Amino acid sequence: MNKIFLIIQREYLSRVKKRSFIVMTIIGPVLMAAMIILPAYLADWSQATDKRIAVLDETGWFLEKFKEEDNLTFYYVFGNLDEEKENALTKNGDLLLYIPRTELNIPVNSELYSLKQPGLNVTSYIKSIMKEIVENKKLLASGIDPEIIKSAKVNINLQTIKVEEDGIEKKSNTEVEVGLAIFSGIMIYFFIFMFGVQVLKGVMEEKSNRIVEVIISSVKPFQLMLGKIFGVALVGLTQFLLWIILTLIIVGIFQSGAFTDSSSAMDMLGNSDVLKNAGKGGIDPMIMVNEVIGGINIKVMIFSFIFYFLGGYLLYSSLFAAIGGAIDHDTDSQQFMLPVSIPLIFSIALSGVIVNQPDSTLAIWMSMIPFTSPITMMMRIPFGVPMWQIYVSMGLLVIGFIFTTWMAGKIYKTGILMYGQKVSYPIIWKWLTKKY
Amino acid sequence: MDNNIALQAINVSKSYANHKALNKVSIEVPSQSIFGLLGPNGAGKTTLIRIINLISVMDEGRILLNGRNISTKDIANIGYLPEERGLYKKMKVGEQAVYLAQLKGMSRSDAMKQLKIWFEKYEIGSWWNKKVEELSKGMAQKVQFIVTVLHKPDLLIFDEPFSGFDPINVNLLKDEILQLRNNGATIIFSTHNMASVEELCDNIALIHNSQTVLSGKIHEIKDSYKSNIFEVAYKSLNEISFSNNNYSINESKLIRNIHYSTIKMNNGSTSNDLLQQIIPQAEIISFKEILPSINDIFIQEVSS
């Protein structure tokens, strides 16, 4: 046991001290924080500039109709186009909206002059006001009161409410759940691959350095393999924790620094797309977020993420260790890596199907089979999964990785001492079935 | 059980998928001696060494260490230098040596203390913080050797220890092996270098086609392979000749007025008898028995 600890320690320290680990640890949170902060920051930044717009309305329909909106202010001018263009753009640095008189007398064409490309908020606001006024005029001309039309419009608000087994009703939001499902599925996929491949490379390094026989004269090959797998797992957990902590710190710094003027990053986040939709029903976006997250069992979520990350990692990394032990050269790794990783790729490829129908037979089976369950079950959990299914899936995963570790151990201990042998599946089968 | 036998392999057999690597191989290694394990490539030497190190599992037979069945507890008392050897390239020399010593069961502080002594002895203290990849192959081999013997095991096993060393380091290693034996260690080594076997070994075993074909004390083996051939150098006008056919001259040559003849004795007569035959005929300058070299014995056994 003491020797396994020594091996874990070496595997852990030698990786954590690597420059690539430190770089990844810094870049990861910066990217994640950027994903959170940037949209909010950009939204804030794009709203920051005030624009003044001169309106040259030859029709007279829109006089005093453009009101001050957000950071847009309107003023009316009555000269000729060239003169006012000169005034507004060159002298004042403003924009000029020109609505020419038309032959049919229905103003549907207009021109907006500006020095810089006007933002989407400017053009869409102008269009919406013009549309409303022209429509109203046309309605009135047909003898219809625009107020009647207005009052006939309804806004349908569909609130999905999930009823838990214990009868407690929770508000849920499918979009948030889909996001969470895809995110956790991809994270698991990413972690299994990243750290599984580290195990593979580590085993191959020991074999090609010829140090492996020196070590297994002191410890059992199985101990060496387990030590490596656990050591790398700890590296993965360390990186994961550091990412979360550093991301929170970076976001925190931005909240207190860049968004001092009352609007915090989280408030800004409330304005982003998904939540904006949620907020349309007149509910405060932040309350919505809390309610939605409350609807997903956050404890189950975190616990199962760690469980499936570790379980999936143990299952696959032992197989990767066996591959690393069996082969001699990097170039041979492909033919063995691909079949082993197909279930992982398959689960990611089917993620769209899974999140669309998280309770379909396919989804249930894939979340039970240990080779696909880490990703698929994590994609199902945000939508709510009966606890018994989670327990069965976890149990099968434990059995699965004990089995693959045992099998990998047999391949590994024979493979690491074989140099210069071209490895094939029949040979590996011999190693598995015959005692070496 | 003989107390002087450190390690004994009794009827050890081992099969791989396609061939039998060892077929009822037995060896006896007396304690505090140097034992040479010889054999052509693929004879099964490395398999036997791996079985002794508990890396491979034998199908049948027993391995006794000091009269008891060998077990994992003995591993700390064995030092093993495999034929396929190396170190972590990216790891620092000192750190790595301490790690490997700890795996053998040494405490960290003890390992540090012993390493200091060895690094001073070889004057390589400046390597401590270098990465192994910065060392030359010969330098790395030195570190590897130190790591093998650091925990002062009673049994040392070297598989092809001289491969990869330059002649200066080979001599250094030979001296070190002799000194380890004199300090009380039992040493088994396998090699193709027959000169070093004659120089170092007290006992040898020759494994061929998965079987022990000969084993024992090196001088006894050489005695049993001698074919009663003597070389005599003498001054005389004529070549000597023998009246009876107890003696036959294999080869004669004349270099600067001195005759050199190799003479084979065909029956139980002694060297004194032969001398008496020559003395009347010539003035003897030198007279010696030609013993077969281990190299000759090896080739004779393996090619027969």
Image: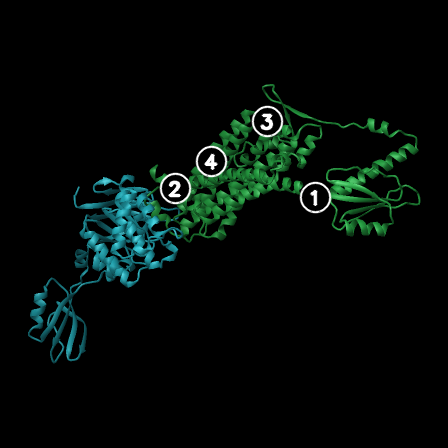
User: Callout 1: few (<14), some (14-19), or many (20+) C-alpha neighbours within 10 Å?
Assistant: few
| Mark 4 or 1, nearer chain start | 1
| Mark 4 or 3, nearer chain start | 3
- Mark 3 and mark 1 residues within 8 Å of each other at the beta carbon: no
Q: Given the image, on which type of amino acid does mark 1 rest?
A: Thr
The residue labelled by disc 1 is A49
Would you say B153 lies left or right of A134 here?
Answer: left
The colour of chain A is green
Q: Quick check: can you spot residue B114?
A: yes
The residue labelled by disc 4 is A401
Q: Given the image, on which type of amino acid does mark 2 rest?
A: Gln
User: Callout 2: few (<14), some (14-19), or many (20+) C-alpha neighbours within 10 Å?
Assistant: some
**Looking at the rendering, which quadrant does residue A13 occupy?**
top left
Residue at the top extreme, as displayed: A167
Element class at badge 4: helix
Q: Residue A357: where, in percent of width, then height?
A: 64, 31
Would you say A157 lies left or right of A139 here?
Answer: left
Q: Quick check: can you spot residue A435?
A: no
Q: Residue A149: where, in percent of width, then height?
A: 85, 29
Chain letter, disc 1 residue: A
Question: Which is closer to the viewer, label 4 or label 1?
Answer: 1
- Same subunit, labels 2 and 3: the answer reads yes
| Mark 4 or 2, nearer chain start | 2
Q: CA distance from mark 2 to mark 3?
A: 39 Å
Q: CA distance from mark 4 to mark 2?
A: 22 Å
| Mark 2 or 3, nearer chain start | 2
**Looking at the rendering, which quadrant does residue B170 occupy?**
bottom left
The residue labelled by disc 3 is A294
